[in-house]
Structures are given as structure tokens and as C-alpha cells.
């Protein structure tokens, strides 16, 4: 997976957008590009406080297509929304860092109608966490981990393993 993001932030609002190129293992699948973005609103973030709190919502979309003559595809839309919590250790100089966690709820719509299935809507929960290193010039380096769980349904990406993100 190769991805890139761009963002714009003001004192109370930030907006991010990005794309990810998924290099599939299956030669019959086109290399899909996932698009996504989010918006966040800062609730607490004062220089004298070592914590920050925000709320956020986002959306991501990917269509996974095969290269055969009938060009089957699975379309997935994911909409997360939640709260972000950050600890900001005091730093001096031109570099600062945040340690953060973001519990959230997820709504996902998976459309299998092009591969003989149905459209499935699911709700789930997840949490992300990471470290942000920020430089005074507005450039940063970010690392994160993510975990998500969904209520099971009879039709899932596992039913169509060729289109499964675990297989990609």
C-alpha cells in the first residue's frame, strides 16, 4: 500500500484528504485506488494544557475491479466518526510531538451486486492510535495503528475472497 495525504488546519477546524494505491496480489484484479478524507473540530487545545480533544467524521471509498471481460467489482464506502484525544508533552525548540488515540464508530456499505451478492450495511467500532512529530515549518511525520470490528453479516468480503482486503 502506498498512500499520501494533504491537509489544511485552522485553529478550530482541520480538513484532510488522501488517496491510497493498493498493490493487489491477484493479477486478475486492477490495482484499486482508495479515496478518503475527514474533517475535525477542536474542542480543547490550549498551549498551557498538555491535552487536546477533537471530534471528527470522514469518508473513504474504493471500488475493487477485476480485469476479466465481465469486469466484476465490489464497492466499499466507510464513514467513521468519533473523538480524538491527544497528550502533548512539553517541548522546546522547533520540534513537537503528540501521542493520540481516537475511538470511533464506523458505518460501512459494501456493494456485492456486481458479483452476485447484495448490498450490506454494517456498523462497527474501532480505535486508532499514533504519534505525530511536527516541525515549525508546517511539515510533519505521522505513524499510526488501527483496529476495527464489525457485526457479522451473511455476505461479507470474506464470501468473495478474490475481493477481500485481506487477500489484496
Image: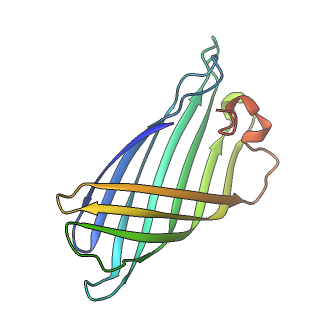
Residue at the image point whose x is 23% and y is 75% from the top: 92
Colour scheme in the image? rainbow
Q: Nearer the viewer, residue 47 or 108?
A: 47
Residue at the image point whose x is 49% and y is 57% from the top: 144
Q: Indicate left or right for 16 with 60 as reference.
A: left
| Residue that protrudes farthest toward the left in the picture | 137
Q: Position of residue 68 (x, y in %)?
A: 64, 13
Q: Position of residue 71 (x, y in %)?
A: 61, 19
Q: Nearer the viewer, residue 37 or 94?
A: 94
| Residue that protrudes farthest toward the bottom in the picture | 48
Q: Indicate left or right for 154 with 8 as reference.
A: right
Q: Tell me: residue 11, above or below residue 124.
A: below
Q: Nearer the viewer, residue 161 or 63?
A: 161
Q: Nearer the viewer, residue 139 or 9?
A: 139
Q: Tell me: residue 144, above or below residue 98.
A: above
Residue at the image point whose x is 43% and y is 68% from the top: 56
Q: Quadrant of residue 152?
A: bottom right
| Residue that protrudes farthest toward the right in the picture | 154
Q: Tell me: residue 118, above or below residue 25.
A: below
| Residue that protrudes farthest toward the front in the picture | 93
Q: Tell me: residue 66, above or below residue 125.
A: above
Q: Quadrant of residue 10?
A: bottom left
Q: Indicate left or right for 9 with 89 as reference.
A: left
The total of numbered circles placed on residues is 0
Q: Position of residue 134 (x, y in %)?
A: 29, 62
Amino acid at each position: 500500500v502506498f498512500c499520501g495525504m494533504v491537509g489544511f488546519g485552522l485553529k478550530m477546524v482541520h480538513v484532510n484528504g488522501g488517496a491510497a494505491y493498493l498493490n493487489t496480489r491477484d493479477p486478475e484484479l486492477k490495482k484499486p485506488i482508495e479515496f478518503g478524507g475527514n474533517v475535525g473540530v477542536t474542542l480543547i487545545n490550549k498551549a498551557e494544557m498538555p491535552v487536546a480533544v477533537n471530534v471528527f467524521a470522514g469518508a473513504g471509498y474504493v471500488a475493487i475491479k477485476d480485469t476479466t471481460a465481465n469486469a466484476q467489482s465490489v464497492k466499499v464506502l466507510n464513514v467513521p466518526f468519533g473523538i480524538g484525544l491527544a497528550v502533548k508533552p512539553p517541548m522546546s525548540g522547533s520540534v513537537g510531538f503528540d501521542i493520540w488515540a481516537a475511538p470511533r464508530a464506523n458505518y460501512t456499505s459494501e456493494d456485492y451486486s456486481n458479483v452476485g451478492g447484495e448490498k450490506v450495511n454494517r456498523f462497527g467500532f474501532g480505535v486508532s492510535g499514533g504519534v505525530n512529530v511536527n516541525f515549525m515549518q508546517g511539515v510533519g511525520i505521522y505513524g499510526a495503528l488501527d483496529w476495527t470490528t464489525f457485526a457479522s453479516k451473511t455476505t461479507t468480503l470474506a464470501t468473495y475472497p478474490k475481493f477481500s482486503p485481506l487477500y489484496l
